[in-house]
Amino acid sequence: MVTMTRSKTFQAYLPTCHRTYSCIHCRAHLANHDELISKVIHGLVNVGCGPAEERVLLTGLHAVADIYCENCKTTLGWKYEHAFESSQKYKEGKFIIELAHMIKDNGWE
């Protein structure tokens, strides 16, 4: 009898010469440190996006979509899809990953 096991494979690997952020649960690469904009992550890999829903956040009403690790399916944070207040429009299209769900990898000595 042959037992098949499913190995964890990551969809994308970031260059090892850069400091990266990874999923704390499965270590899938998520973002390159150089792609941070004021602590808001812009370019992500290995991340899926759920449907948008309206939520009242600290800064007002927004349409946001949960984002999750494609490898282990853990919810990592959210993506701002739409801001209803004009002062918050700059957030549209940007991602938030909660610190509890990521770890620093590669060259953070």
Image (tube, rainbow, N blue to C red):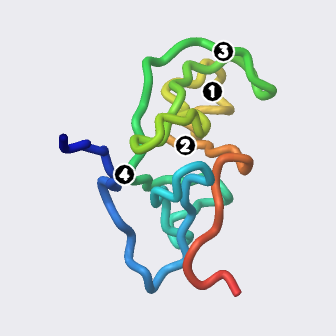
**CA gap, disc 4 to disc 3?**
33 Å
Secondary structure, mark 3, is strand
The span from disc 4 to disc 1 (Cα, nearest Å) is: 42 Å
Give the distance between the C-alpha atoms of the residues marked 3 and 2, in whole angstroms: 15 Å
Nearer the observer, 76 or 1: 1
**Residue carrying label 1:** 86
Q: Amino acid at mark 4?
A: Lys
Residue count near mark 3 (Cα–Cα under 10 Å), binned few <14, some 14–19, many ≥20: few
Q: Foreground mark, 4 or 3?
A: 4
| Residue 14 horizontal side relative to residue 1, left or right | right
Which residue corresponds to mark 4? 8
Disc on the earlier residue, 3 or 2: 3
Q: Secondary structure at mark 2?
A: strand
Amino acid type, mark 2: Phe
The first of marks 2 and 1 along the sequence is 1
Q: Picture coordinates of residue 63 (x, y %)?
A: 55, 19
Who's the residue at 67% across and 59% down the image?
A: 38
Q: Residues within 10 Å of mark 2 (few under 14, many from 20)?
A: many
Q: Residue at x 24, y 43 (%)?
A: 4
- The residue drawn where x is 72% and y is 15% is 56
Kindly identify which residue carries mark 2.
95
| Nearest-to-viewer mark from 1 and 3 | 3
Q: CA distance from mark 2 to mark 1?
A: 18 Å
Residue furthest out toward the left: 1
Q: Looking at numbered disc 3 in the image, what kind of residue is underneath it?
A: Arg
Q: Which residue is mark 3?
A: 55
- The earlier-in-sequence mark between 4 and 3 is 4
